[in-house]
Amino acid sequence: MYGNDRLTTIIKVARQYAGRQVSWSIAIVGWQYFEHPFDPAAVQAVNDGQRLVTDTVPVAFEGPYTDVLDLSFCHDGAHFNAAGLQIHAEIWQNAIMRRINRDDFENDGYVDFVVFSDFARKWLEIDCCS
């Protein structure tokens, strides 16, 4: 798994600078990391490393799988063009909403005061406010 040690170090150092355990959402992306030709095994290793971080680092969450945006959504082979940025924002929004809806403990389709209260309690338990 490629890069998971570096990503874990970045998160650790950022949290040290912030003085608190900042939460992270990590997009699962691999193809943009490599020069062409495309190597599916290398991309999978990067994706596996990113998922390992979200599985093992506290308060690190899996974001969207952004490799669905291919080179046609890039203006220079690596950075998103306007259409790519629009779709990128939409898939991030969907990932965040899935995470919020996953925490709808009452399964009524709403993240209401009861759910928010439980979220706030958990937030305090992991000391995210200090």
Image (spheres, rainbow, N blue to C red):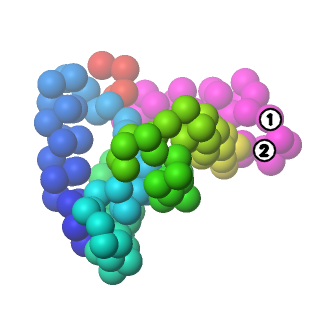
- Residue at position x 49%, y 36% in the image: 81
Asked where in the image residue 32 lies, by quadrant, the reply is bottom left
- Left or right: 4, with 96 as reference point: left
Q: Nearer the viewer, residue 2 or 99?
A: 2
In the image, residue 74 above or below residue 54: above
Residue 116 painted magenta: yes
117 above or below 25? above
Q: Label 2, secondary structure: give it.
A: loop
Evaluate if marks 1 and 2 touch, with contact meaning CB atoms under 8 Å apart.
Answer: yes
> What residue is pinned by disc 2?
106
The magenta stretch spans which residues?
104-126
The amino acid type found where label 1 is placed reads: Tyr
Mark 1 to mark 2 CA distance (whole Å): 8 Å
Q: In front: mark 1 or mark 2? A: 1
54 left or right, relative to 102? left
Determine the secondary structure under disc 1: loop
Which residue lies under the disc numbered 1? 110
**Depth order, front residue of 34/124:** 34
Q: List x then y, in percent, for residue 6.
A: 16, 53
Q: Residue furthest bottom?
A: 41
Q: In this orientation, which residue lies closer to the viewer: 77 or 59?
A: 77
Where residue 23 sits in the image (x, y, percent)? Answer: 37, 36
How many numbered marks does the figure carry?
2
Amino acid bearing label 2: Glu
Q: Quadrant of the N terminus?
A: bottom left
For the point 32% across and 31% down, which residue is it?
A: 22
Whether residue 84 sits left or right of residue 109 in the image: it is left
Can you tell which mark lies on residue 126?
A: none
Residue 15 appears in which quarter of the rendering?
top left
Q: Is residue 55 visible to us here?
A: no
Q: Residues within 10 Å of mark 1 (few under 14, many from 20)?
A: some
Return the residue found at the far right: 108
